Amino acid sequence: MNIVSSGVSLTVDDPAASSRFFTSHLGFREILVGENFIALGRDDAAVDLVLVERDLERWQPGQGLADVIVVFTVTSLAREYERLRSEGATISIPLRREPWGELLMQLTDPNGVTIQLVEWISPITS
């Protein structure tokens, strides 16, 4: 697996308020703003942050809703998904494509830590 970047996803009640905090006080900038999330980054070695709005109706039980998610952006995610599945890794969200151009899956480690693997791809156009 080739990890090209990493980040932490934080599930919060108000992504915009958290974004204002990180951009005003800690030097982050908004990289991507979506309907229910805001991605933040910096030009130095700081980890990227993704602020996701807490929406219990959006997630099904057992499908990876966590307050903190470790995120790795990788290459060849479909191949990695098959490898991890064949190795018996605990997959909490199977491989899926989001309309904004993200291929993703989630794993859970033996201690309950949620790990999300993503690959950026072309957005779905209507």
Image (cartoon, grey):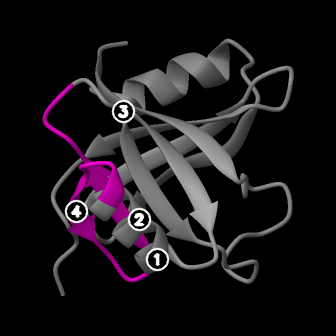
How far is disc 3 from disc 1 in space, using C-alphas? 19 Å
Say which amino acid is labelled 3. Answer: Val
Label 2 sits on a secondary structure element that is: helix
Q: Nearer the viewer, residue 64 or 103?
A: 64
Q: Answer with the quarter of the image where residue 79 lies.
A: top left
Whether residue 1 appears in magenta in the rendering, the answer is no
How far is disc 1 from disc 2 in space, using C-alphas? 6 Å
How far is disc 4 from disc 3 in space, using C-alphas? 13 Å
Whether residue 33 appears in magenta in the rendering, the answer is yes
For label 2, the crowd category at 10 Å Cα-Cα, with few meaning under 14, some 14 to 19 and many 20 or more, is few
Say which amino acid is labelled 2. Answer: Phe
For label 1, the crowd category at 10 Å Cα-Cα, with few meaning under 14, some 14 to 19 and many 20 or more, is few
Say which amino acid is labelled 1. Answer: Ala
Pointer 3 or 2: first along the chain: 2
**The C terminus appears in which quarter of the rendering?**
bottom left
Q: What mark, if any, has residue 47 been given in the picture?
A: 3
Label 3 sits on a secondary structure element that is: loop
Q: Answer with the quarter of the image where residue 85 lies.
A: top right
Q: What mark, if any, has residue 30 been given in the picture?
A: 4
Pointer 4 or 3: first along the chain: 4
Q: Which residue is mark 1?
A: 17
For label 4, the crowd category at 10 Å Cα-Cα, with few meaning under 14, some 14 to 19 and many 20 or more, is some
Which residue is pictured at 16% across the width and 79% down the height? Answer: 125
Residue 92 pos. (x, y %): 73, 43
Are the residues at dot 1 and dot 2 in contact (C-beta closer than 8 Å)? yes
Which label sits in the foreground, 1 or 4?
A: 1
Q: Which residue is mark 2?
A: 21
**The N terminus appears in which quarter of the rendering?**
top left
Which residue is pictured at 65% across the width and 17% down the height? Answer: 86
Pointer 3 or 1: first along the chain: 1
Pointer 2 or 4: first along the chain: 2
